[in-house]
Image (cartoon, grey):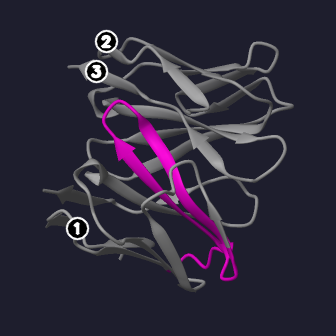
Amino acid sequence: DADVTQTPRNRITKTGKRIMLECSQTKGHDRMYWYRQDPGLGLQLIYYSFDVKDINKGEISDGYSVSRQAQAKFSLSLESAIPNQTALYFCATSWRDTGELFFGEGSRLTVL
Amino acid sequence: SQQGEEDPQALSIQEGENATMNCSYKTSINNLQWYRQNSGRGLVHLILIRSNEREKHSGRLRVTLDTSKKSSSLLITASRAADTASYFCATRMASGTYKYIFGTGTRLKVLA
């Protein structure tokens, strides 16, 4: 089983719908991240959390919200999806300040 | 805005040749990492170099860091078809928040 699991892996939705992407990890890491990847733009940081009570905005948090339900779970919500939120979303984890990020396989979201 | 910019954006070489890709960044860093991404998959950590290091090796990978020029290079020696992927640098800034900012990536194609 994967150490960092994202669900769903693929989702097609319509403009205005609420969407939740979920991430769970079995690595025991304290830090979790949500990134968005668009073609040619690399990865952009949406939100990050250093522990359950510490959540921070990244570069592109507008239109997104997150919830850290437990150390192992970090979910990303789009309250009212819009077409320019169509992208590949990655969850990642790390342990303290050791440096290495561990990524999930991604959630491909299409907003029509 | 992106912290890192990779160069070239795309690179095509023959199997057995060396591949070099570069990363430039804007602000002082604590460390710089390189990641690999196979098409549409999650990113995989390759190597981390700290700001007080100038060169690091891992198998067929060689990373250099020039903090005066705010740049890093990744060399893959004796490339294989399986090295075909996108390669990203990620930087952790020296001060402020401990988050990682990714560059735009280099798409490497190794021809058999």
- Which residue bears the numbered disc 2? B13
Q: Which region of the structure is painted magenta?
A: A26-54
Q: Is residue A65 above or below residue B68?
A: below
Q: Position of residue B22 (x, y in %)?
A: 55, 17
For the residues marked 3 and 2, what is the alpha-carbon distance in whole angstroms? 5 Å
- Which residue bears the numbered disc 1? A16
Callout 3: SS:
strand
Q: Give amino acid for label 2.
A: Ile
Q: Give amino acid for label 1.
A: Gly
Callout 1: SS:
loop
Q: Quadrant of residue B14?
A: top left
Callout 2 environment at 10 Å: few (<14), some (14 to 19), or many (20+)? some
The secondary structure that dominates the magenta segment is strand
- Foreground label between 1 and 2: 1
**Residues at circles 3 and 2 in contact by the CB criterion of under 8 Å:** yes
Q: Position of residue A96 (x, y in %)?
A: 74, 66
- Is B92 left, or right, of A29 in this rendering? right
Q: Is residue A112 above or below residue A31?
A: above
Callout 3 environment at 10 Å: few (<14), some (14 to 19), or many (20+)? many
Quadrant into which the C terminus of chain A falls: bottom left
- For the residue pair A87 and B109, the one nearer the viewer reads as A87
Quadrant into which the N terminus of chain A falls: bottom left
